[in-house]
Amino acid sequence: MISNERPSPYGRTYRRPPAPPRPHVQEDTVKTEKLQIERKNFVFALKENPRGRFLRITEDVNGRHDTIIVPATGLEEFKRVLDEMVKASAETPPKVTDPYPEVDALR
């Protein structure tokens, strides 16, 4: 069943009509930074539209894009949490298991 289909008590399936397309909203770019980490490319774009400023973070992995948008009003809190994650990562050693322990035993 498709997510917009609902079962009917009469045995028929109701399909909701598609929503009308949203009108294009003009966005102005304030600043953009690109960052590559391993095989991932990140684009940080500070943008502005009539509703306000926001940070759009786009991850590109082999042509697949995922995006999150953080309103400018939440950037300080976002930074605080990110700083805490960086600190926790630096303080906590990674749990890396050796995939070839028998090779190390031979050395």
Image: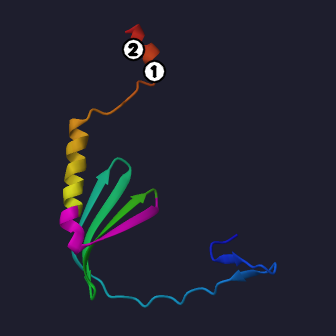
- Numbered tag placed on residue 7 in the rendering: none
Was residue 74 drawn as part of the magenta stretch in this picture?
yes
Residue 79 in the image: above or below residue 11: above
Do the residues bearing badges 1 and 2 touch, measured as CB atoms within 8 Å?
Answer: yes
For residue 41, side relative to residue 11 (left or right): left
Q: Secondary structure at mark 2?
A: helix
Question: Residue at left 63%, top 87%?
Answer: 17
Which residue is at the front of the view, 11 or 90?
11
To which quarter of the image does residue 76 belong?
bottom left
Was residue 89 drawn as part of the magenta stretch in this picture?
no
- Residue 89 lies, in percent from the top left, at 25, 41
Question: Residue at left 25%, top 35%?
Answer: 92
Q: Quadrant of the C terminus?
A: top left
- Residue 29 lies, in percent from the top left, at 24, 78
Question: Residue at left 23%, top 69%?
Answer: 74
- Residue 16 lies, in percent from the top left, at 64, 84
For residue 56, side relative to residue 62 (left or right): left
Question: Residue at left 41%, top 24%?
Answer: 98
Q: Amino acid at mark 1?
A: Tyr
For residue 31, side relative to residue 41 (left or right): left
Q: Amino acid at mark 2?
A: Asp
Residue 43 in the image: above or below residue 100: below
To which quarter of the image does residue 25 belong?
bottom left
In the rendered image, the residue lying farthest to the front is 9
Q: Secondary structure at mark 1?
A: loop
Q: Quadrant of the N terminus?
A: bottom right
Dot 2 alpha-carbon crowd within 10 angstroms: few under 14, some 14 to 19, many 20 or more: few
Residue 101 in the image: above or below residue 82: above
The magenta region covers 63-77
Residue wearing tag 1: 100
Residue wearing tag 2: 104
Q: Marks 1 and 2, Cα distance to the nearest angstrom?
A: 7 Å
